[in-house]
Image (cartoon, helix red, strand yellow):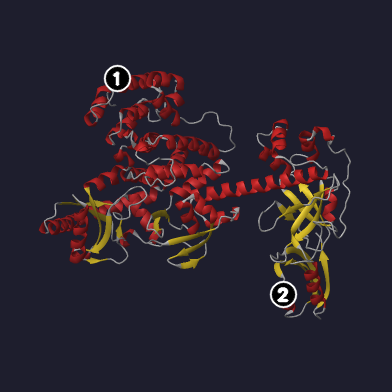
Amino acid sequence: MMRQYELVERVLKYDHTADEALLNRAYVYAMKAHGNQKRASGAPYFSHPLEVAAILTELKLDDATIATALLHDVIEDTDATRAEIDQMFGAEIGSLVDGLTKIKRLDLVSKKAEQAENFRKLLIAISTDIRVLLVKLADRLHNMRTLEHMKPESRQRNSEETLDIYAPLAGMMGMQALREELEDHAFRWLHPQAYEIVTEKLTELRQPNRGLVEEIRRAIALKCADAGIKAEATGREKKPYAIWRKMENKQISLEQLSDIYGFRVIVDTIEDCYRVLGIVHTTWSTVPGRFKDYISAPKRNNYQSIHTTVYGPRHQRVELQIRTHDMQHIAEYGIAAHALYKDRQYHANGRDADDDTDDSPYGRLRAMISSLLEAANPEEFLEHTKLELFHDQVFCFTPKGRLIALPRGATPLDFAYAVHTDVGNEAIAAYINGRHVPIDTHLRNGDEVVIETSKNHVRSAAWEAFAITGRARAAIRRAAREAERKRFVELGRQLVGSTLAGMEIDYSEEKIKAAAPKMGFKSADELLAAVGRNDVALPDILAAVVPQAGVGPVEEGYKPSRRFGRAQAQDGWFNIEKIQSLKFRTAEIDNTAAISIGGPSQELPVRFEPGGAVPGDRIVGVMAPGEGIRVFQIHSPRLKEYEEAHWIDATWDVDPEHPQRFPARISVTAVNEPGSLAEIAKIIGETGGNIDNIKMAKRAADFTVMHIELEVFDLVHLNHIIAGLRAKSSVAKVERLFE
């Protein structure tokens, strides 16, 4: 076990300004706090935080991070408290340690939900300070190094978690060496047989290929030297997990793999990178489709390098990476190489980590975390996290040349949200390389994407199916929730306003604001939304808004009168020549002010019952708690279920300039003969109807009864379809269904 002075010397070796006293205090405090605690291996528990600290010294992290590593388990596993840590080591370290502490005594149904909640807490802490992630990755690495001492079920769970979350997180931060080691440890315990086979085969190949690897390395180095380029050429064996994953993806055996070894050329300048590339490509034949320039288009984790594959000496396939020394340092250590946590000017130089346009790995991580936290439940959160972390990349461009990196499989909708949330919310169409494409088209490297937007577009939750990024999905969910809230607010406003108008009282937002606290709501919009959802009875809010009016709750057993007719001149009731959408009026108070619902300018929460209703039908609306208004045809048997509910008299108001189809259901009894179904569909189609669904309700030897769900413009249109069907010899009976 590393001694106290050895740890301090390690830190001072790369950071002469480190606080020795802080490191010493943290070492002694953690050792005393853990006391006689033992790990599963039997070693003193304090050896674990000490090893975590040692791993972080290899990354040359600051003294506060090293102290946090020493203390990261004291709150969770000892009697130490956050207040005590703050007092002894300061609020900064206290916050870091708290971010690494699991939530205790979680009252959740499943272990997966508990895992998700703890991981959610960790991500929130990471979004505040990247050092939390660095300590957590080091913690996970040491745990994986000593996993053989754990129970089999713990090995399985930790390995899955590592492969699903922590290894991709390390990759996202550009910490490739750490990622590879995590993957190999997890691979060893999740697939022991495969791991053994791959490692044994690599051992067999190592000796006979040693001469070949050196020959290829020397040939590359010699070519660079002849061109006057100072270069370091090295060859390395690929990791077992990387080999196994390639075997799985390509469905080939290890013997068929020709690129088990990779070669790397490290030079001084970017210019030298491209000079080496030219030498390699003019000396050996290239393998088509195996060239990638990550220098001009870096990966999302800031990784830069040129990748190419050639047929080298002895006609062997050679995978080659060409990069500078700085690029190599970043490739190995990722975000730890940037020392972002030390740069106090980071937020002062115009690059705010909260900015959606931040292209740094940490900025993108913060944006990803923000979107993931929108998940509805812990399990969904964990699943979205895995999806977000596991994607490769495609690189696309805006018309102005801005590079947008997205997960493989991303669509123009993902692209729109990556540009800006407002662009995503207003996107209605997409053009790829000048060609109009569906919004769910998969993007490819190099695509130029143009997004067509509309300020009036309302994003539906169904659009979530067209997106794969967590950011886009979360934004769509937020937009859908906000649109739904606005619909209920508007419905509530119209209901209250209409009723007040019938009482000859002017509607005022100030009155609603004043009533909101009395009803237990924070704002007028919250109260109006509750009215729209029928969570608050209209008489109750009227009593709060206009106490002097004497409007009280509806008496038990009250049944609203059904007034379905009106005088011809009464505005808002059915007029086949002036149909806009639907209009409603309340039954409690006799008034002539109609409530307009729907139309091109707004979408209020209205849905038709299964039997449907069409303009020309007498209809009634029912306020359904949490749903808005349900529309029933007056003959619907289901209307009886709501006899005691809050009914709203309803009318049609549909604009002939913007015709809309409405749902209806018919029953057709047809003779069993060839072509009868086709004849029925032809009649409906030729008369302008649209078939939504057909269900075979009853079959006999000589006839079939089918229930057809239609979309028609109005009652006249529906009757025309029914008459056309009845005129056919193959149709015995047609009638309308209301349930």
- Asked whether, in this view, residue 296 is left or right of residue 718, the answer is left
* Residue 189 visible in this rendered orientation of the protein: no
Which element carries disc 1, helix, strand or loop?
Answer: helix
Q: Where, by quadrant of the figure, is residue 521 drawn?
A: top right
Expressed as whole percent of the image width and height from the top left, the position of residue 470 reads 49, 49
Q: Tell me which label, 1 or 2, sits earlier in the chain.
A: 1
Asked if 285 appears above or below 42 in the picture, the reply is below
Report the Cα–Cα distance between label 1 and label 2.
85 Å
Asked whether disc 1 touches disc 2, contact meaning CB atoms under 8 Å apart, the reply is no
Which one is nearer the viewer's eye here, 487 or 589?
589
- The residue tagged 1 is 21
Tell me the quadrant of the picture where the N terminus can be found: top left
Which one is nearer the viewer's eye here, 151 or 537?
537
Which one is nearer the viewer's eye here, 234 or 460?
460
Which numbered tag is attached to residue 681?
A: 2
Expressed as whole percent of the image width and height from the top left, the position of residue 219 reads 15, 59
